[in-house]
């Protein structure tokens, strides 16, 4: 039986990972659950799954959670709690949102575990540092993002990495596909959260609406698969059936297709190198919609361009980009700035990137903090001018 640690278990990825575990009885044992502060849902999951240990990052609610845990389940709490339970299982699912997922990623890899990675920010922000941890014997990353899972699956058709001509990431286009820049001046939070094909958390849904999510995925693909930015392309595919493609030197293109269902890439990461026996996202080919593809409009969606620029700059530029984006998205969700200002805040912040090399976790943390300060200042200037 494969042991699993679900970190970020109460969020979108975590709850769907629980669905996969339920669908394959006797195959997986959840030995750890972890969340930032969702006491109620964490207690419910612990009651069902009976893990030996539960982690809560918010230690102010530890006593409340402890009183609700089943007998035999230990509680660890505090800022380091999530990382502490990220080395106790065969497979660690990192479903933590944002840069806070970095300690989970490093803990799992440094312990030589398989990391089912849904937290793209940790790899993007600290790519050079994560690559060192990735070389730990036994450590491996199997991506959970649907696009990178698709690429991972397609690359199994390659005899050698040198066979790959290019990677093509697909993007749904989000809720604002086809709109002009002028039409996006006054869009609401509710409109931005109305994703046409995927059910995701608010931060990643806003990232999808700006195409920053796809830009971050370009950087992630570079880090995961060691392919240069000139060989990573993005196409808009509104049906979200083709999840990504790999083109080989002989002209053949291999793609992974399924209906939108995050339980498929989660299950792929849990079962790798095997397959689940439970189908998620299976296609009824008699009813499959027409499949369309188009070039993304980087004038309307400049976040995609900014991500390519930060990725090519390398070192701590992606960390700076990711941190500024988190601040800008949070400000938009709070009603402090408009949707178009998300990209403006990020671009202003990137002007101040000092060119620092990603030599250590401490350096990455410092760049993250400084970028957040710059982004908050950019947000405040807009609030003062309003």
Image (cartoon, grey):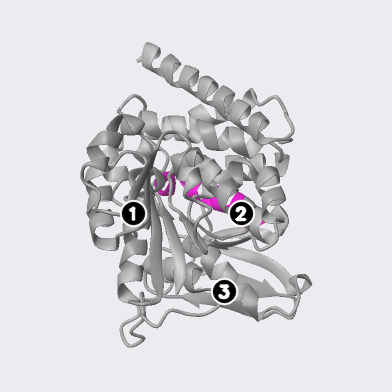
- Upstream in sequence: badge 2 or badge 1: 1
Q: Is residue 143 above or below residue 73?
A: below
Identify the residue position indicated by label 3 in the image.
Answer: 153
Residue 109 in the figure: left or right of residue 150: right
Q: Is residue 30 visible?
A: yes
Magenta range is 207-222
Q: Secondary structure at mark 1?
A: helix
Residue 57 at x, y percent in the picture: 39, 37
Residue under the point 59% across and 64% down: 168
Q: Is residue 242 visible?
A: no
Residue 300 in the figure: left or right of residue 320: left
Identify the residue position indicated by label 1 in the image.
Answer: 12
Identify the residue position indicated by label 2 in the image.
Answer: 111
Residue 40 in the figure: left or right of residue 337: left
- Residue 79 occupies quadrant: top left
Which residue of the protein is positioned furthest toward the right in this rendering?
A: 162
Mark toward the viewer: 2 or 1:
2
């Amino acid at each position: 039986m494969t042991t699993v640690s679900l970190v970020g278990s109460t969020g979108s990825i975590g709850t769907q990972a629980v669905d996969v575990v339920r669908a394959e009885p006797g195959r997986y044992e959840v030995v750890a659950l972890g969340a930032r502060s969702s006491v109620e849902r964490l207690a419910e999951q612990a009651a069902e799954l009976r893990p030996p240990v539960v982690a809560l990052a918010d230690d102010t609610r530890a006593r409340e959670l402890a009183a609700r845990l089943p007998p035999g389940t230990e509680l660890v709490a505090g800022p380091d709690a999530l990382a502490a339970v990220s080395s106790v299982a065969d497979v660690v699912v990192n479903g933590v949102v944002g840069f806070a997922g970095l300690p989970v990623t490093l803990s799992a890899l440094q312990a030589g575990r398989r990391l089912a990675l849904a937290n793209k920010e940790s790899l993007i922000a600290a790519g050079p540092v994560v690559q060192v941890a990735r070389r730990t014997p036994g450590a491996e990353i199997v991506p959970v993002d649907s696009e990178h899972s698709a690429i991972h699956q397609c690359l199994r058709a390659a005899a050698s990495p040198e066979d790959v001509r290019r990677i093509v990431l697909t993007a749904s286009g989000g809720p604002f596909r086809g709109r002009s820049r002028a039409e996006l001046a006054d869009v609401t939070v509710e409109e931005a959260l109305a994703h046409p094909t995927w059910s995701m958390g608010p931060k990643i849904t806003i990232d999808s609406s700006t195409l920053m999510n796809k830009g971050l995925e370009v950087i992630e693909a570079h880090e995961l698969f060691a392919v240069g930015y000139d060989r990573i392309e993005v196409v808009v595919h509104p049906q979200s059936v083709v999840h990504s493609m790999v083109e080989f030197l002989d002209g053949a293109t291999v793609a992974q297709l399924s209906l939108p269902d995050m339980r498929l890439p989660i299950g792929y990461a849990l079962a790798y190198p095997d397959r689940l026996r439970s189908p998620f996202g299976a296609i009824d080919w008699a009813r499959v919609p027409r499949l369309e593809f188009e070039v993304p409009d980087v004038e309307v969606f400049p976040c995609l361009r900014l991500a390519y620029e930060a990725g090519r700059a390398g070192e701590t530029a992606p960390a700076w980009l990711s941190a500024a984006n988190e601040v800008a998205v949070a400000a938009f969700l709070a009603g402090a700035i408009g949707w178009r200002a998300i990209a403006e805040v990020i671009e202003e912040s990137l002007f101040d990137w000092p060119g620092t090399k990603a030599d250590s976790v401490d350096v990455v943390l410092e760049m993250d903090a400084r970028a957040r300060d710059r982004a908050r200042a950019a947000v405040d200037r807009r609030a003062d001018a309003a």
